[in-house]
């Protein structure tokens, strides 16, 4: 497995975990694909928000930091989608 393929698999796994955790926090189910989609979009949103707000979690484990960042982003995405859909 090449480095790029390994990085993609890790990114998707982090997205899946983050989407699942976001589903636990804010409720709702989307199945495997829904959790993956929430987590992947949340990874980008969380990364942008944390960088824009200059937030550093101070956790030395990179994977844990990425999961937390993606989960926060996924929660924001789900809540924003609910606000838009409800309006």
Image (tube, rainbow, N blue to C red):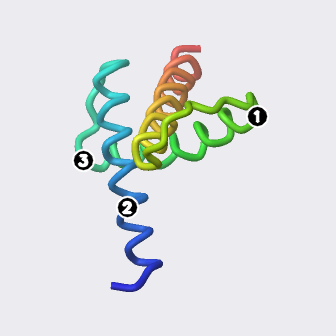
The answer to which of marks 1 and 2 sits earlier in the sequence is: 2
Label 1 to label 3: alpha-carbon separation: 30 Å
The answer to which of marks 1 and 3 sits earlier in the sequence is: 3
| Quadrant, the C terminus | top right
Question: In the picture provided, is 84 more to the left or to the right than 15?
Answer: right
Disc number for residue 10: 2
Q: Residue at x 54, y 26 (%)?
A: 76
Quadrant of res 83: top right
Judge by depth and name the residue closer to the eye, 33 or 14.
Answer: 14
Residue under pointer 1 = 52
Mark 2 surroundings within 10 Å by alpha-carbon count, few (fewer than 14), some (14 through 19), many (20 or more): few
Q: Could you tell me which secondary element the residue under label 2 belongs to?
A: helix
Q: Could you tell me which secondary element the residue under label 1 belongs to?
A: helix
The answer to which of marks 3 and 2 sits earlier in the sequence is: 2
Q: Nearer the viewer, mark 1 or mark 3?
A: 1
Q: Residue at x 38, y 50 (%)?
A: 14
Mark 1 surroundings within 10 Å by alpha-carbon count, few (fewer than 14), some (14 through 19), many (20 or more): few
Q: Could you tell me which secondary element the residue under label 3 belongs to?
A: helix
Mark 3 surroundings within 10 Å by alpha-carbon count, few (fewer than 14), some (14 through 19), many (20 or more): few
Judge by depth and name the residue closer to the eye, 81 or 39.
Answer: 39
> Is the residue under label 3 in contact with that under label 1 (CB below 8 Å)?
no
> Residue 72: horizontal and vertical position, in percent?
50, 29
Quadrant of res 5: bottom left
Residue 18's place in the image compared with 72, above or below, is below
Disc number for residue 32: 3
> Residue 69: horizontal and vertical position, in percent?
51, 36
> Residue 47: horizontal and vertical position, in percent?
62, 42
| Quadrant, the N terminus | bottom left
Question: In the picture provided, is 12 more to the left or to the right than 52?
Answer: left
């Amino acid at each position: 497995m090449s480095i790029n393929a390994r990085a993609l698999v890790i990114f998707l796994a982090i997205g899946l975990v983050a989407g699942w955790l976001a589903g636990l926090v804010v409720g709702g189910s989307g199945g495997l694909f829904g959790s993956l989609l929430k987590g992947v979009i949340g990874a980008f949103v969380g990364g942008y928000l944390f960088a824009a707000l200059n937030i550093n979690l101070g956790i030395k484990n990179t994977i844990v930091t990425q999961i937390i960042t993606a989960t926060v982003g996924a929660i924001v995405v789900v809540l924003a989608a609910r606000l838009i859909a409800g309006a």
